[in-house]
Image (tube, rainbow, N blue to C red):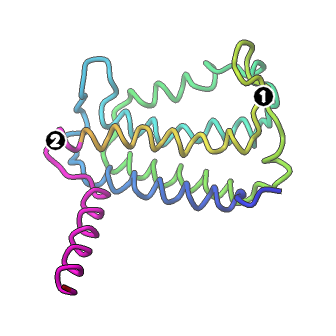
Amino acid sequence: MNCYGAKDLAASFRTVRKNTIVIAEEIGEEHYGFRPAPGSRSVAETLIHIALVPQAARHIHGTAHISDLAQMNFMDFWGPRMAAEKAPHTKEQILEMLRTEGETFAGWLDTVNDELLAETVAMPPGMDPSHKTRFEMLLGPKEHEMHHRGQLMVIERILGMTPHLTRQTEARFAAMQNSKASAS
């Protein structure tokens, strides 16, 4: 039995998604087409990508309950989602997608039991390790989102913005400095 279970996964995913939504809200819609480099995703494409990736985890571990990833046709699954990334969306549509898809995934995680988390899934041939637990794989959407959120935070800096998590950390440090100064 895991000490850190599905409810913890759901709660931590909700926290990560909440912080992604703050970034999506703070970046102006006029910057949603911004690409930091040729060939990279735009802000809008990155946010849509983040919103849709958890669908794969729900599909693999829930809906289809796949136990061997070599049996999954990835392009059939990802093709429509890749097209959705390229389709035009307003900022409000993207925010709604982030909210809805995030809560759908987190709500599903809330229902997962320890037996499912302990199951193993075979990876496609050539991958190392050859098997992973569903628990390890279900950490993936959060890790993936944090990776792309880091990219968005760099984009905020390029656009002249200070990311909200940085502002919060700076405020805590300033409060500690002020507290230390007044105690002296």
Residue at image x 77%, y 22%?
Answer: 130
Q: From what the image shows, is residue 154 above or below residue 76?
A: below
The answer to whether residue 137 is left or right of residue 52 is right
In magenta segment, residue 71: no
Above or below, comparing residue 178 to residue 168 in the picture: below
Seen as rendered, the residue at the extreme left is: 160
Q: Callout 1, which amino acid?
A: His
Q: Which residue is mark 1?
A: 131
Q: For the magenta stretch, what is the residue range?
A: 156-183
Q: Secondary structure at mark 2?
A: loop
Q: Does residue 85 sit above or below 170 in this rendering?
A: above
Image spot of residue 55 (x, y percent)? 60, 40
Question: Which residue is drawn at the image coordinates 22% and 87% (left, top)?
Answer: 183
Q: Quadrant of residue 25?
A: bottom left
| Magenta-colored segment: predominant secondary structure | helix
* Residue found at x 45% / y 30%: 84
Residue 159 tag number = 2
Q: Tell me if residue 176 comes above or below residue 53 in the rendering.
A: below
Which residue is more in the foreground, 157 or 105?
157
At which x and y percent is residue 27? 24, 48
Badge 2 amino acid: Leu
Residue 171 belongs to the span the image colors magenta:
yes
Q: Residue furthest top?
A: 126
**Image quarter for residue 131?**
top right
Disc 1 or 2, which lies upstream in sequence?
Answer: 1
